[in-house]
Structure formats: C-alpha cells, structure tokens
Image (spheres, grey):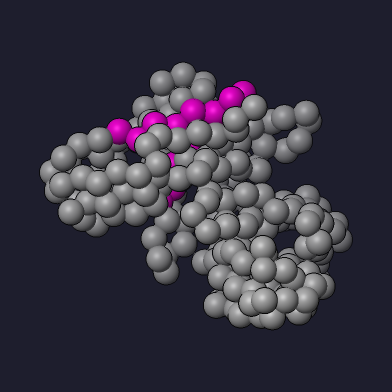
C-alpha cells in the first residue's frame, strides 16, 4: 500500500540557513503528495501540495517537487526564520478518505 | 468561516470517567476524521466518517466510539477513560471544494486530554 518515509529529526538551524527535509514515498499510481506543518500548540495546517508528477508545490517560501524518478517529495526553504520552527509532516492518500503521514520532523530555528 | 472547531481545548479526567469531544466544520465537507497524536508515534487515525450516516474504524479504535451527528458535526466519545488515552486529539475534514480533489484534509486546533 501507499506509504511515506520521512527524514527523522530533530533539525536545528540558524536563521537564514537552508532547510531540506527528505520525504520518499511508495505508491500505486501517482497520488497527490502533501506537506503539513504544525506550529507549537496548534493543529496541522496544509503547507503545500502537488497533485501530479513533476508538479512543484510552494507556499511561504517553501517548495517541494513531485519527482517520480526518485519517488521523492523533499521540502526545501532557502532562508529560514525563527517563525518556521515547527513540526513538518509529509503525507499521501491511502485511498479517497485516509492519509498516510510520515513520523514528522521537528525543526528549530535559532536567532 | 471558522474551518474546523473543537471543544474543549483542554480536559483532565480520572480513570473510568467518560467524556465526549466535539468537532464541527463549516466547509460543507462530506468526510470527517479523528486522530490522536502521541510523542514518537506521529498521527494515528481513530475513526473516520466518509459521509453523513457512515463511520469506520481507523488504526486505533479500541476504547472509543464516534457519532456523525449531521454533516457538520462528528463527536468522539471515551466511555471509560484510561491513562493510555492521554493524548492530543485532532479532528479533520475533507471534501470536494471548487472542483479540487477531496484528499486534502483540514485540521482543528486539537484537544489536549490527560487521564489520571
């Protein structure tokens, strides 16, 4: 069945550093791929998504490209801020109703 | 447009007590979900409701019951709380909107439950 494997954290960075969080997937066909973000004390928010191969999702300076050759959907940001400190989850659908989430990567950005 | 709302935000129970977590969405979504989040375990699906009038078990349904009261509301009940149910509970919803695929889920702010 469909599943994602996400880079484990925690990740600690300085402000303005480059961030990459790796996510690889196993899937039948080409389902949508998602990155969700959870800020401290809050619920998950959709950060970005890509609905087909070679699509690039982007939001708030974050980008991820749906790469079928490497079955990957890595999250990147060129210059992180303290406000980007959060837990990031990669996800893909199991079927029409269920999502499979990665374990989450905790990112801490220091001033 | 409030999105997904959950009540209460915090709750402390004693072992054996019962309670109901409430969830409502105003996005006219067909599908709703209950998850629990525990340190090191990620998000685990407890129950979901694909559409009004249907409910199905997820990965960890034991000790919980759900009710899809109407299209907007989906409640989670703990009949006899146990310390193992100490967790953060999230409700989510998904549905077709403006022609988009219905696989995007939208989450509420969570209920932080402690069972002593």
Query: Is residue B101 shown above or below B44?
Result: above
Q: Residue furthest front?
A: A111
Q: Residue at x 74, y 53 (%)?
A: A48
Quadrant of the image occupied by residue B25: top right
Magenta segment includes B76: no
B6 and B28: which one is in front? B6
Q: Residue at x 61, y 42 (%)?
A: B105
Would you say residue A51 is visible in this rendering? yes
On screen, residue A19 above or below B37: below
Q: Position of residue B64 (x, y in %)?
A: 29, 41
Q: Quadrant of the C terminus of chain B?
A: bottom left
From the top left corner, tell me how far across and down residue B29 is, in percent: 60, 28
Q: Magenta stretch mostly in which secondary structure?
A: strand
Asked if residue A5 shows in the view, the reply is no
Give the total of numbered labels: 0
Residue B56 x %, y % = 41, 37
The relative height of residue A84 versus residue B73 in the rendered view (above or below) is below
- For residue B23, side relative to residue B102 (left or right): left
Q: Residue at x 76, y 79 (%)?
A: A17
- Please tell me whether residue B34 belongs to the stretch shown in magenta: yes
Give the quadrant of the N terminus of chain B.
Answer: top right
Left or right of A52: which side holds B1?
left
- What is the x, y in percent for residue A44? 57, 51
In the image shown, does B86 or B71 lie closer to the viewer?
B86
Residue at point 84% right, 59% down? A56
| Residue at the extreme top of the image, as rendered | B70
Q: State the extent of the magenta-drawn residues as a range.
A: B20-36
């Amino acid at each position: 069945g469909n599943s994602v494997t996400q880079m484990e954290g925690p990740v600690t960075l300085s402000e303005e550093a480059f961030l990459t969080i790796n996510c690889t997937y196993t899937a039948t066909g080409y389902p949508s791929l998602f990155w969700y973000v959870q800020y401290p004390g809050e619920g998950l928010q959709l950060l970005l998504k890509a609905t087909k191969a070679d699509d690039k999702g982007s939001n708030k300076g974050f980008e991820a490209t749906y790469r079928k050759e490497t079955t990957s959907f890595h999250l990147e940001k060129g210059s992180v801020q303290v406000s980007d400190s959060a837990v990031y989850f990669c996800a893909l659908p199991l079927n029409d109703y269920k999502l499979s989430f990665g374990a989450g990567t905790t990112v801490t950005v220091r001033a | 447009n409030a999105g997904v709302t959950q009540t209460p935000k915090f709750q402390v129970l004693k072992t054996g007590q019962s309670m109901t977590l409430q969830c409502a969405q105003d996005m006219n979504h067909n599908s709703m979900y209950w998850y629990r989040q525990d340190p090191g375990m990620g998000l685990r699906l407890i129950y979901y409701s694909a559409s009004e009038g249907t409910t199905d078990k997820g990965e960890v349904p034991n000790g919980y019951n759900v009710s899809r009261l109407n299209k907007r509301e989906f409640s989670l009940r703990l009949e006899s709380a146990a310390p193992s149910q100490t967790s953060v509970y999230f409700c989510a919803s998904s549905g077709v909107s403006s022609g988009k695929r219905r696989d995007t889920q939208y989450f509420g702010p969570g209920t932080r439950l402690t069972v002593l």
